[in-house]
Image (tube, rainbow, N blue to C red):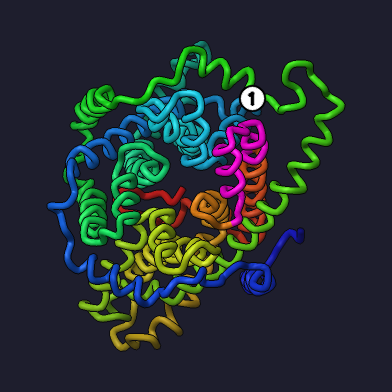
Amino acid sequence: MPERLTRLQVTGAFLLLGLAALPFADLGLAGHDPWSALGRMAAGFLAPDFGAVEQIGRALLLTVAFAVAGVAAGALAGLALAPFYGLRAVRWPCIALRSVHELFWALLLMQALGIGAATGVLAIALPYAGIFAKVFAEYLEEADQRPSKVLPPGVDGLSRFLYARAPLALAPMRIYTLYRLECGLRSSAVLGFVGLPTLGFQLDSFFRQGDYGAASAIMICYIVLIASIRLWMRRALVPVWIVVAIAVLASVHSPPMGEGALWRFLSQDIVPAPLRAGGDWSALAGWLASLLRAEALPGLWATLVCAQIALVLTGAFAFAGFGLIVPRVAGRAGALAGHLVLVVLRSFPEYMLAYLFLQLFGPSMLPAILALSLHNGAIIAHLVGRQAAALEPGLRADAPRGVTLWAWEFAPRLFGPFLALCLYRWEIILRETAVMGLLGGMTLGFFIDSAVAELRLDRAVVLLVAAGALTAAVDALSRRVRGCIGAANVRSLPAQTVIGDRTA
């Protein structure tokens, strides 16, 4: 790769890749009448039926409890690992942990721990530990080093860290942890789609019954939960919420897994079949080749195709839409409406949006592409739009308004940050694309779900490794390309989301 690339070269390359992927994408409608389904869905959504939802309070509380416990455990583990993140022995396991989606972790953990509280908490905590370790390590590196340097030479490393470095990074760590709680709520809700008793479970049940009024009630509760997070999650209340989460999760009853389930999972289920009971190493190569040829490579290809198209549409939506929240472009009423649309789109997890589109268009890549584009596009549009709004006070009094201002002032000035954010979301889009296979698309998630359903966990583990390797490779490539266009440090952008200031 050249040392320097222009932004237009990078944009053109990604556009060409997206166009080249189109002939290989499954974008057909699966025999449904989408307009009729959309009409029934819209009628239900306009008349939310809260009375049809039993125990909605408990589902909400469990969604919060799984998120709080998972994020707290992940943050504590990440905090412990962050000072040592420079060591390969720590960095590589962290990369592996965060490369696997929460839903994949849940599917795997269910085989050893059952459908219970431990599965839900660990499914969130494990990938988040890897993310927290990386981000906290960056905060520690960026903290002012001068206090540590003025300490006497005899001061031990632990004291130097605790008294001179960690306190300077605490404020951004706290903000980031709050942002991660918002992400944890999304993850917790989505875990309901694989059987855990959160809001996603209720939503899935009502969609299967065609009760769109009750589904609408669930979705309204979810948006209110996310939008009100500043009100119910305060720093002083964090210990209280952790205690409440533990108490609530302790009340969750799960079917017994039988004695020795965890040991059988570790010593038998995830061991490649040729190596069980005899260790036939000569057959391992053939077993791996067959799995790669029949499932891993087709799944990787479909994941890449879907992700590349979604990335291009994400960029198109974000670039065209960031002006929607700028008063001088859209007007005050228009900006308010734009904010509302972007908040709703970025509050819903991609998986939940894809599930909605699946009801309309049937199983193909189309629901996944639309969901990924709208969710990620809304996030980028929000972040770039905030930058555009911050530029407004510095404009001349006779500066134009509307589309002219967007096209001739904001678009050229903010194209660099916009492109950097698209590249930053590339790895996230790819990670989410893999999991969309659980909804029926032929991405890696489809093959992983099939392997788990057939109790062929050794094959599922190999496919998860392939998914993690692809995600890590794209993350590395994204950082390289960002470096080539001089936008390696995305954190310099005002990347504020609902409550936090990071986009990771």
Residue at 83 percent across and 34 percent down: it is 285
Quadrant of the frame with the N terminus: bottom right
Residue sitting nearer the eye, 225 or 137: 225
Q: Position of residue 90 (x, y in %)?
A: 59, 26
Q: How many marks?
A: 1
**In the picture shown, does residue 134 fall above or below 306?**
above
Amino acid type, residue under disc 1 in the picture: Ala
Q: Quadrant of residue 320?
A: bottom left
Q: From this viewpoint, is residue 346 visible?
A: yes
Q: Position of residue 189 (x, y in %)?
A: 34, 45
Residue beneath label 1, please? 89
Q: Which residues are magenta?
A: 442-464
Q: Position of residue 491 (x, y in %)?
A: 47, 51
Residue sitting nearer the eye, 375 or 88: 375
Outermost residue, right side: 282
In the displayed structure, does residue 177 sit left or right of residue 148? left
| Neighbour tally class for label 1: few under 14, some 14-19, many 20 plus, Cα within 10 Å | few
Q: Quadrant of residue 341?
A: bottom left
In the displayed structure, does residue 147 sit left or right of residue 424? left
Residue at 62 percent across and 71 percent down: it is 11
**In the picture shown, does residue 424 fall above or below 26?**
above
Q: Main secondary structure of the magenta part?
A: helix
Residue at 69 percent across and 72 percent down: it is 20
In the displayed structure, does residue 354 sit left or right of residue 485? left
Q: Position of residue 234 (x, y in %)?
A: 20, 38
* SS at mark 1 in the image: helix
